[in-house]
Image (cartoon, rainbow, N blue to C red):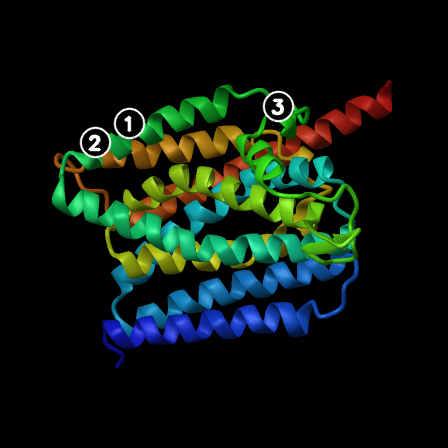
Amino acid sequence: MLDERGMWIFFIVLVAVLFFFDFFVLNRKKEKISVKKAVGLSVFWIAVGLLFGVVIFFVHDPDMAVTYYTAYAIEKMMSVDNLFVFMIIFSYFCVPDEYQHKALFAGILGAVVLRFLFIFVGVQLIDRFSFMMYVFGIILIVTAIRTVMKKESGDVSMEGNIFVRFCRRFMNVSDTYDGGKFFTRKNGIRMATPLLMTVIVLEFSDIVFALDSIPAVLAISRDTFIIYSSNVFAILGLRSLYFALKGALSSLAYLKYGLGAILVFVGMKMLLSDIYDVEPLVSLAIILLIIVLTVMASVLLTRKEKQKGSLQ
């Protein structure tokens, strides 16, 4: 049986091996990722995330495994909503299809480090200041309202993005790509390529995402290992999921409502934690039910619209 330190070591080594396997084996060729390959990779990453929960089940206890799966489901659901932002960023920087995976890989590699810092700070805040549970709960309710009320539009200007302006003010940025390189030279001057700019914007976008997702998983558990491992395994497969769902994202018409419902649930769970403690298995069941209903409703609406269009 592994103790807590042993589990951390096992987790870190496993993630390092998976990163190496992903970049240097699964995607060693710099080419556009097909939908078929992306679906296969998505199944692989989801299986890895689920199997890690099995490890927790046998090493620790069933309740901890259920808590892990609940946090994993929340993070996975929220990450799908973030894929729309990835599409906008790639479109703005005109990133060629064969380099999008590299940009996502670099962005998520940085996110793995930053998320640990956010989670550690969040856990410390709740442990030291009990009222932070209510603060995070209110943040989630507000985020839920903002998610449901936001307008569906792909017309987002990156020119107004503070990070884009900052980079272009303090860095020499090339207007053209140089293969899959992050830096290039023009007239003897070292310049950042649009691919590096893309990674920077993706990185800071993840910081914004983390402000929503981390409070959500803190409502499920205050165990740093459970929160962090569920986050990492959810975002490890985010790149493949992006390419698998890129063409189908517009069909998930009720995604924001499902996400809003999940955020309201976990927000209320935090606000009422001193009055009533929802069992981990119940939380997991409710979140999975919301996800299933969201996908089914979206599929039925898309099918209905197609039938309506064929009749016209």
Residue extending furthest toward the bottom:
1
Q: Which residue is drawn at 60% across and 61% down?
A: 43
Q: Which residue is drawn at 62% across and 35% down?
A: 252
| Position of residue 211 in the picture relative to residue 79 (left or right) | left
| Position of residue 133 in the picture relative to residue 237 (left or right) | left
Residue extending furthest toward the front:
188
- Report the disc number at residue 157: none
- Front-most of 183 and 297? 183
In the rendered view, tell whether residue 106 sits above or below residue 277.
below
First in residue order: circle 1 vs circle 3: 1
Say what secondary structure mark 1 lies in: helix
| Position of residue 76 in the picture relative to residue 94 (left or right) | left
- CA–CA distance in space, label 2 to label 3: 30 Å
- CA–CA distance in space, label 1 to label 3: 24 Å
In the rendered view, tell whether residue 110 sits above or below residue 54.
above
Place of residue 40 in the rendered image (x, y in percent of width and height, measured from the top left):
67, 63
What is the three-letter code of the residue carrying label 2?
Tyr
Say what secondary structure mark 2 lies in: helix
Q: Is residue 35 visible?
A: no
In the rendered view, tell whether residue 45 sits above or below residue 160.
below
Q: Which residue is drawn at 24% across and 31% down?
A: 135
- Residue annotated with mark 2: 134
- Front-most of 165 and 74? 165
| Position of residue 168 in the picture relative to residue 144 (left or right) | right
Q: Quadrant of the N terminus?
A: bottom left
Q: Is residue 115 visible?
A: yes
- Residue annotated with mark 1: 138
- Front-most of 178 and 137? 178
Q: Report crowding for label 1: few under 14, some 14 to 19, many 20 or more residues within 10 A (C-alpha).
A: some
- Report the disc number at residue 152: 3
Q: For residue 202, which quarter of the picture?
A: top right
